[in-house]
Image: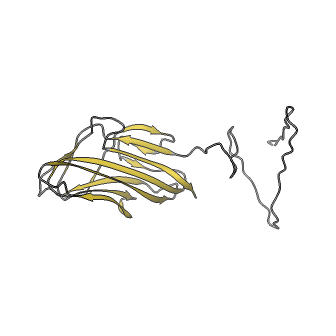
Amino acid sequence: MSVIKIKGSSANTGDFTIQPPDSATDRTLTLPDNTGTIISTESTVPPKVPLFKAYLNTTQSITSSTWTKIAYNTEVIDTDGWYDNTTNYRFTPQQAGYYSTTAGALIQQCNGDGLISVYKNGSESAGARMFQTSPGGTNRDLVVRGTAIIYLNGSTDYLEYYVYQDSSGVTKNLYDGGGSSDAYASVSAYLMRAD
């Protein structure tokens, strides 16, 4: 059986009181099995939150008038290993909550509109189509980028990122932006509020 020990400070004399609420219901406080600082609502220590960032490190072809998944294939950071940058190019967080996600791409020599969208569980997420514009001429590079907040259940829900271009039937390329982490073709997500 594990033992809970409360250790006082020999250097200071301040009293710390653990005060239960006025409740007739039994409650259990479960401590995590690791070493760290317990964060309170008044804490100045920031909590660690899951996050990832990746970018497209190659040129990717996208067919006109077809939604195409973006293969962000190079990770910059993935704190919990929840982003797949080799097979499915999807983010499957294992902690429930609301996530903020930002995605971007640069469509080379686009002759029409471009859009980028986040898909949840294989379908376009409501309200998550992020950006649309016309390049204002023929064969102009077009940047599409935006941010969405989406709830994920922490087990099976996943996010993928799709781009669309409307260049009169002509296949175009997503540019890797020089293959750097701050390029146009990058994606990130982080937990805003745990469930």
Along the horizontal axis of the image, is 132 left or right of 76?
A: left
Q: Position of residue 171 (x, y in %)?
A: 15, 50
* Res 125 visible: no
Could you tell me which quadrant the N terminus lies in?
Answer: top right
Q: Residue at x 48, y 54 (%)?
A: 99
Residue nearest the viewer, comparing 24 with 186:
186
Q: Position of residue 29 (x, y in %)?
A: 74, 53
Image quadrant of residue 20?
bottom right
Q: Residue at x 77, y 60 (%)?
A: 27
Could you tell me which quadrant the C terminus lies in?
Answer: bottom right
Along the horizontal axis of the image, is 58 left or right of 87?
A: left
Image quadrant of residue 36?
top right
Q: Position of residue 62 (x, y in %)?
A: 20, 50
Colour setup of the view? secondary structure
Residue nearest the viewer, comparing 146 with 168:
146
Image quadrant of residue 65?
bottom left
